Image (spheres, grey):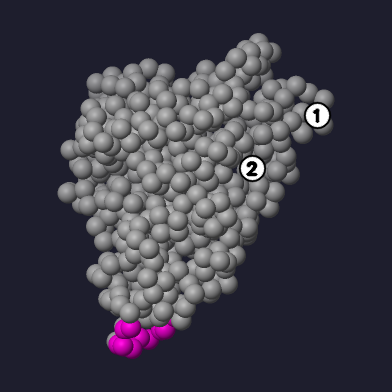
Amino acid sequence: MNDILIRGGTVFDGTGRAGVTADLAIKDGRIAAIGPRIAEPATKVIEAQGLAVAPGFIDIKTHSDFTLPINPKAESKVRQGVTTEIIGHCGFSVAPVLTGKVTLLKDYLSPSAPWTPFREMSFPEYLDTFPATSVNAGMLVGHNTLRLMVMGMADRAPTPSELAEMIELLEQGLRAGALGMSSGLFTPPGSYARADEMQAFGHVLKRHHAGYFTHLRDEANNVLEAVQEAIDIASACGVHVEIVHFKCSGMDNWGKATTALDMIAAARARGLDIDCDAYPYAAGSNPLKNLLPQWVQAGGVPAMLERLTLHETRTKIRADIEREGLNNWGRIPSWDCVQISISPHLPQFAGRTILSLATERSQDPVDTLCDYLADDQGATRVLVTSISEDDIEHIVASPRALVGSDGNCVAPYGQVGKGMPHPRFYGTFPRILTHYVRERGALPLELAIHKMTGATARALKFSDRGLLKQGYRADVAIFDPADFRDLATYADPHRFPSGARTTVIVNGMMVVENAKHTEALPGQVLRRDESGAVG
């Protein structure tokens, strides 16, 4: 007898082929059969007429390592149909944490992980002790974290011994099953690394058949040069490169997405293994401090806050922003495009913009920003509206771009319900299926599902996930394509998608049934084996 029988749905297998009406049977956590009419009985029957039956969505770019330990139900993600998250991105991983370095990492990540319980641990211990969750999780070792552990915030190249120590920490994680290494070359200390350092790590990743996931050095005025840097690592090291949350930020850079995607396509045509992913929103999210020039952030948060008290610092910040725009974000229409999202010490200001606060205080916006950072102890996170809608649609429609939310799993309650996070935390996947597939007609449903499932599984080297195929792991998303809409907004972000018949299965266990969480925590830590396959 089967455990679950999904009867009469439109099955999209994740390969990009059009959906077909079929039954799907699940037994012992795997897909037992797919066919026009499965006669073998099942303990649980799901009548899926009129519903899409797809592989569970794979969120290739998330920061849920900051929230899964305190929100293991992963509700904002699993209610979108997400069954797997890849965590530890942008160079920010919560392990390894060496002796005496907990406070250093905690302070560094405070705008992103204000409630995360940090502790001393190796990366193998991190994987071995990760809590039970509702979604599968694959982990990356963060390059910024490695640099912090070995070099602190030093603005220089590593010595040979320091590089060797960072490589050993990376290899400990890779031997334990980490999927690869992430970098955040846009912000210190990752921004202090030059090409030879990153290629040294790239060769290590190649030896272990692991991947390199990069937040580009610049997503704004030098975005094409940064894309080329990523391509150069793929070429020099022969390693898979994932350009994460790809965007061309800032008004001066709108329209460059076509050129960048063409560069990636040309690299792939030369045999390089390179992909990108993106989220379907015009606003990004970042620590407020990262909008400032990098020289302001030198030496860590305490040094930055002391520097911001100086009149001459603010004068120079103002001049730099006038000349170049915001660091890594470019020129924005106004300070009304910078909205407080998470503010641990000043929660009453969540949702306010820098311009509205400056107007209320009769201040120059740069002074307001600097004062706010000081009052919030450098821990503020903001939303920055800086991306062209035309570029977004072009990227979403491209078969070369995968889908990643760049969001944490949160919920409308408890610690993770605080503040006003980016609506992508709740809405990325249904937004593509609703706005770009059904409303805009930018791409067909089967291609959208492929970009969220089979194509992502290929990029990640998954051995038995990402497709609806006999013998594969039973990660399944069931939804009504006509009633699966993102409801989260910038003004009201803590809202689950619509869809009363949405059901999500993880490793053969129902986690969401008819849009209600079952409390099940069947997720697994996914590990890469010596061949590079992930299972």
Q: Quadrant of the C terminus?
A: bottom left
Residue drawn at 57 percent across, 28 percent down:
250
Q: Quadrant of the N terminus?
A: bottom left
**Residue 277 at least partly seen:** yes
Q: Identify the disc placed on residue 359.
A: 1
User: In terms of depth relative to the viewer, which is nearer, 231 or 77?
Assistant: 231
Name the outermost residue toward the top: 312
**Residue 306 at least partly seen:** no
Q: Is 171 covered by the magenta stretch?
A: no
x, y percent for residue 394: 48, 41
Give the structural element (helix, strand or loop) at label 2.
Answer: strand
x, y percent for residue 466: 33, 59
Determine which residue is flagged by label 2.
Answer: 341
User: In terms of depth relative to the viewer, which is nearer, 24 or 382?
Assistant: 24
x, y percent for residue 114: 56, 44
Give the answer, above or below, for where 459 lies relative to 515.
Answer: above
Give the answer, above or below, for where 439 lies relative to 388.
Answer: below
Q: Earlier in the sequence, mark 1 or mark 2?
A: 2
Give the answer, above or below, for where 299 lies relative to 247.
Answer: above
The span picked out in magenta is: 37-46
Image quarter for residue 354? top right
Residue drawn at 70 percent across, 43 percent down:
351
